[in-house]
Image (tube, rainbow, N blue to C red):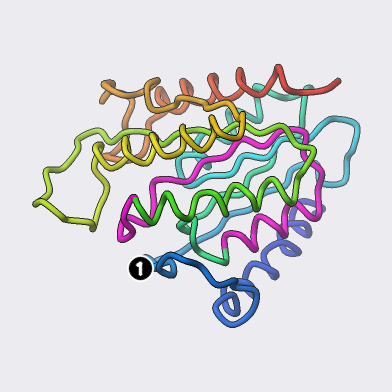
Amino acid sequence: MNEYMNTIKLILPIILVAGFASFAGAEPATYSPSAHESIEWCDIWISHADETNLPRVLLIGDSITRAYYPEVEKQLAGKAYVARLTSSAFISDPALLQQIKMVLSQYKFEVIHFNNGMHGWQHSEKEYAQAFPEYLQAIQKNAPNAKLICANTTPLKISPTLPPGNQTQATDERIAARNVIVLKVMQANGIPVDDLNSLVRGHPECHSDNVHFNDQGIALQAAQVAAQIVPLLNH
């Protein structure tokens, strides 16, 4: 019941943010406003919300993160309480920045492991580079004492061949370009990068479809994510 009520309390602000972010709280940007996909979603899950005897960890990402979250939670059992904020929103979407602020204002996290790169393919990599610093600043500003780890974006099982100039969908080339951008930003800020891309690249047997992963791929990612987090936990 406590988990249910905490979920309800978090869902209601998300609905308001999604409905009104374009009218209030959206700051002017130098890049194009975020283009929405046909379905936009956000999933926030705070486990052990009423307990304080262990440090908290937050995983920020998309459906890839949501898939490995349960296994990371199991591997960190007894060491930390693990929460997730997963979303389809592109990094320039004001709703995503509002969601980050909302979660970080309610809970203190010892470690935040974050990723954003598998959505918003209508946006160029130039726009991605322009938007990423604000996304990072939203995390840093609202969790100034948290230790940060940035995960790069995982590869596709099969990368499509697109006509020159096509900016409509994911390819491994575009994913690699976004990962280079992320690496440069993280190096400039002294934040470690969890290289999940290299971990599963060239292993199609780890995929359940062209984007997502099966149990084998999820287990590999979860083990690496947990291994990155454990040394940063204070006991």
Which residue, given by chain and number where applicable, does mark 1 sit on? Answer: 38
Q: Is residue 96 left or right of residue 6?
A: left
Does 109 lie within the magenta span?
Answer: yes
Check the image and report above or below for 8 versus 126. below
Q: Is residue 147 left or right of residue 156?
A: right
Residue name at image x 61 percent, y 21 percent: 228
Outermost residue toward the left in this view: 163
Q: Where is residue 148? Give x, y as percent.
A: 66, 34
Outermost residue toward the bottom in this view: 23
Q: Is residue 166 left or right of residue 111?
A: left
Q: Where is residue 46? Give x, y as percent.
A: 72, 47
Residue name at image x 77 percent, y 39 percent: 109
Residue type, label 1: Ser
Count of numbered circles in the view: 1
Magenta highlight range: 96-125
Check the image and report above or below for 131 versus 207. below
- Quadrant where the N terminus sits is bottom right
Q: Where is residue 88? Give x, y as percent.
A: 46, 56
Q: Is residue 60 left or right of residue 161?
A: right
Residue name at image x 53 percent, y 42 percent: 66
Residue name at image x 46 percent, y 24 percent: 195
**SS for tag 1?**
loop
Camera-nearest residue between 178 and 18: 178
Q: Where is residue 5? Give x, y as percent.
A: 78, 60
- Quadrant where the C terminus sits is top right
Q: Mark 1 Cα within 10 Å, few/some/many (few <14, many 20+)?
A: few
Check the image and report above or below for 142 versus 224. below
Does 18 lie within the magenta span?
Answer: no
